[in-house]
Image (cartoon, helix red, strand yellow):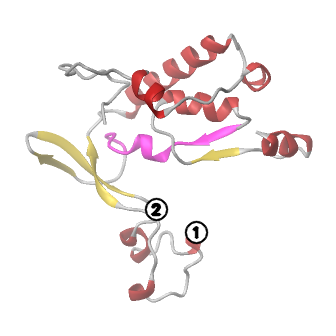
Amino acid sequence: MNVAEAAHRLGKTVVADGGIRYSGDIVKALAAGGDVVMIGSLFAGTEESPGEAVIYKGRSFKSYRGMGSLGAMKGGCSKDRYFQEGTTEDKLVPEGIEGMVPHKGPISGVIYQMVGGIRAGMGYVGAPTLERLHEDSHFVQVTAASMKESHPHDVVITKEAPNYRAE
């Protein structure tokens, strides 16, 4: 958060990148001083995302390839991003994975849920604007047990919610 304050004093934009899994993570990244948040992996699995749709164990999935994956680097679309241009394929060092993610349907539904979650998070802080979110947010450290307790537990989820997936 000190970095964000220093960057803003210099007129720089702070880009939060990595670890975003839920809309609450977006709110935290913005509250910590981020001006924008990179959320590419949250769009994985939408109809509009690249990747082949497959059925696995009776459920619909889409293939996923992170930009730092070996496949993306070999495909020529990200070697330079990871400072590995000119590196032969057998010497590439991947920083991402390839796999599959649950099919999520149209991106519009994912965005709708994210925006709703961001609004809720800003409401918890009492912040009607991003500027107020930056100014009015306070962070507290929680234990792993507290984090576990804050998520659904001691129940088998029988109907998936569009904005939450048990992991």
Which amino acid type corresponds to the residue marked 1 in the rendered image?
Arg
Q: Residue at x 70, y 14 (%)?
A: 127
| Percent of width and height locating residue 11 | 88, 44
Looking at the image, the residue that sits furthest to the left is: 58
Residue that label 1 marks: 81
Front-lying residue, 95 or 81: 95
Q: Residue at x 38, y 87 (%)?
A: 90
Label 1 close to label 2 by CB (< 8 Å): yes
| Percent of width and height locating residue 123 | 61, 11
> Around disc 2, counting alpha carbons within 10 Å, would you say few (fewer than 14), some (14 to 19), or many (20 or more)?
many
5 is within the stretch colored magenta: no
Residue that label 2 marks: 67
Q: Residue at x 30, y 35 (%)?
A: 104
Q: Which mark is residue 114?
A: none
Front-lying residue, 142 or 105: 142
Q: Is residue 111 visible?
A: no
Give residue 105's quadrant in the image: top left
Which amino acid type corresponds to the residue marked 2 in the rendered image?
Met
Where 47 falls versus 70 (above or below)? above
| Percent of width and height locating residue 161 | 30, 21
Q: Quadrant of the C terminus?
A: top left
Q: State which tag comes first along the sequence, 1 or 2.
A: 2
Q: Is residue 44 visible?
A: yes
The stretch of residues the image draws in magenta is: 35-48
Where 131 falls versus 88 (above or below)? above
Label 2: state its secondary structure.
loop
Label 1: state its secondary structure.
helix
Q: Residue at x 67, y 27 (%)?
A: 139
